[in-house]
Amino acid sequence: MFLGLLSGIGSGLLPQHLSVCRLALVCLTSPRWVSTYPALMMDHEPPSKRSRSAEEKRSVKDRDANRGGGGGPGLRGVSRPRDTSRPGKVLSEDFKSKHVARTMRDMSERKDAGKHTMSQSRGSKSDLRCVDEMLGTSSRDAVGEPPPPGTESPDLQAPMRGWESLLPRWWEGSPACATAMAPHRGGRALDLSVMSYNILSQELLRANGYLYTHCPPAALRWSHRLRNLLAELRHYDADVLCLQEVQEDHFENQIRPALHAQGYECVYKKRTGKKPDGCVVAFKTSRLCLLSSNPVEFFRPGDALLDRDNVGLVVLLRPAGAGVDDGDVLCVANTHLLYNPRRGDVKLAQLAILLAEIGRLARLPNGAAHPVLLCGDFNSTPWSPLVTFLLNGRLDYRHLPIGTVSGQEYGSRGQRLLESPIWSPALGINQRCQYESTCASVTPSHSCGAAAVEREISELTVQEVAQQAAAQQGFAQPTVADKALNSWRLEHGVPLRSCYTPCLPPDGRAAITTCHSRCAMMVDYILYTPCESLPGERGLQLLDRLLLVGQPELEEVNGLPNVRHSSDHLPLLAHFRWMVGERS
């Protein structure tokens, strides 16, 4: 009744009185009228008064910050140094906003000098508004879907602009490159650059937005991230790209065409099930050509252990212009293992499948082996049992808690231990990470009857057959051990070495490849077969690598992702020398 009376009175008022009536109506009907009133009155205040009010508020915040009362979300007085020797430790609250203003201001000065002025208050909302204006986007749709193909904004259709890293990364020569291999008689040295990069799927970014609250929302928009990622790939211009978390629609509509225009041929393997992303292996057609592509699926229907949708991709590449009978083949494998820190049994089973496929493909007809490049996000730290197994070729897992396999978390109390065998014999892969049946090592057109008859006549055990198969492959010979010990041991025969060390010079701080608002650690790798591991120096020689960074450097740029680095991972990049051609 009161509202009806007020409406009747309002009908007889002059237009200049309507704003006062609207204000009275809001105050009487809203439970939050006290806080609403000043906001409404701001529309009727002169600009000079609004400016003075904002300045007064900033001065109050500054005084509170100087007294130790906090200067915005995440700021808690003076930042303290943090022990980074243990990967995976939760980051401090200072990490989320300490350097936001500095990073935004630096970008504004470089790209749009004189057009945008960053606020001097660190971590304030004005910083985020400036970023929105600078990027031409709104925070409300910061992580929205990209427009359909052909309808991108003119800014996206324009040529890519230059990309400049905010991080202090430089090339470091390998100690072995001082004695670089010289071409053999009739051969040549083929120098290749290789990149491994988890580019952060937009779908996963949206699903895990709580990990990226430190980043301005506008910088998380796919149109901004795509521009940065493509410019970054173009900047490094690697001969071989191994990418993870590549969303299928983005790959088909945007990433593949952009890479094709730069001279790459791409091979893609989407994750199984309803997962929208997958792995990519791309290579410069001017340097290499594709011999075969072999997708690897870790999902096995009905297997309770292998019920995850992770995948791998193994391709065989030949030097461009090489003859069919030259025998120079490079085996490139790319994968993204399960993330779950407490399911080390699943990760080891997935890795065994990938190693078995690498072992099958990286074999020459004469019993020798091709060099191998194994790249990817293993979701395991450098000192973890899983990475140690990859580099040493052996893992004794008796009494090993499942949650310690990847090294992502500390503390194993209450966790169950790995069982023997880890995976079901029905998988067809033994504990030397090789296919048990020789049928798996031949093409489908070949008959396996002869191998089966020979096995029956000789009455060999499964382990003996696997041992003979390993000897024929030309990889490192497996160690013969006691049967009881062997049942708790994993082995593989692919000689691998890591391009990167887990510690950085000169102070030995932990190297980091992934970082967000919760943790920072090294989980990405480029592994390769050293030249001395294969007969005739058929392996690879590391020439140099793009150095990683530690947590202090990442804090200086507000972590990952940020306005310039659009993934929560850093790209790994290395140069190799591969001796190809005839050998004496």
Image: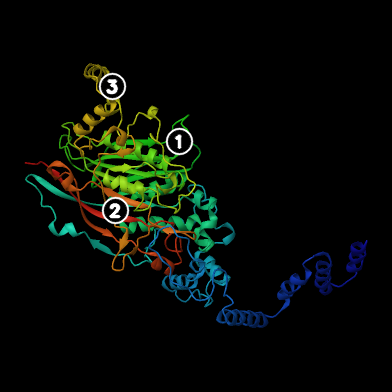
Query: Which residue is nearer to you in this view: 469 or 316?
Result: 469
Residue 23 percent across, percent down from the top left: 80, 70
User: Is residue 258 rendered to the left or right of residue 188?
Assistant: right
Q: Are marks 3 and 2 in contact (CB under 8 Å)?
A: no
Q: Is residue 262 visible to the viewer in this orientation of the structure?
A: no
241 over 37 or under it: above or below: above
> Which residue is disc 2 drawn over?
238
Label 3, residues with CA under 10 Å away: few <14, some 14-19, many ≥20: few
Q: Is residue 59 visible?
A: yes
Horizontal side of 201 relative to 46 (left or right) equals: left
- Residue mark closest to the camera, 1 vs 2: 1
**Secondary structure beneath label 2:** loop
Q: Residue at x 57, y 75 (%)?
A: 70
Q: Nearer the viewer, residue 153 or 414?
A: 414
The quarter holding residue 344 reads: top left
**Residue 378 placement (x, y as % from top left):** 38, 48
If you read the primary sequence from the N terminus, does the residue marked by circle 1 or circle 2 appear first?
2
Is tag 3's residue or tag 1's residue first in the polypeptide sequence? 1
Q: Tell me if label 1 and label 2 are in contact, CB under 8 Å.
A: no
The reply, left or right, for residue 370 in relation to residue 357 is left
Q: What numbered label is drawn on residue 290?
A: none
**Amino acid under label 1?**
Leu
Quadrant location of the C terminus in the rendered image = top left
Q: Mark 1 — residue?
A: 305
Which residue, given by chain and number where applicable, does mark 3 sit on?
445
* Near-viewer residue (324 or 411): 411
**Residue type pointed to by label 3:** Ser
Residue at image position (50%, 66%) is 96
| Disc 1 to disc 2, C-alpha distance | 36 Å
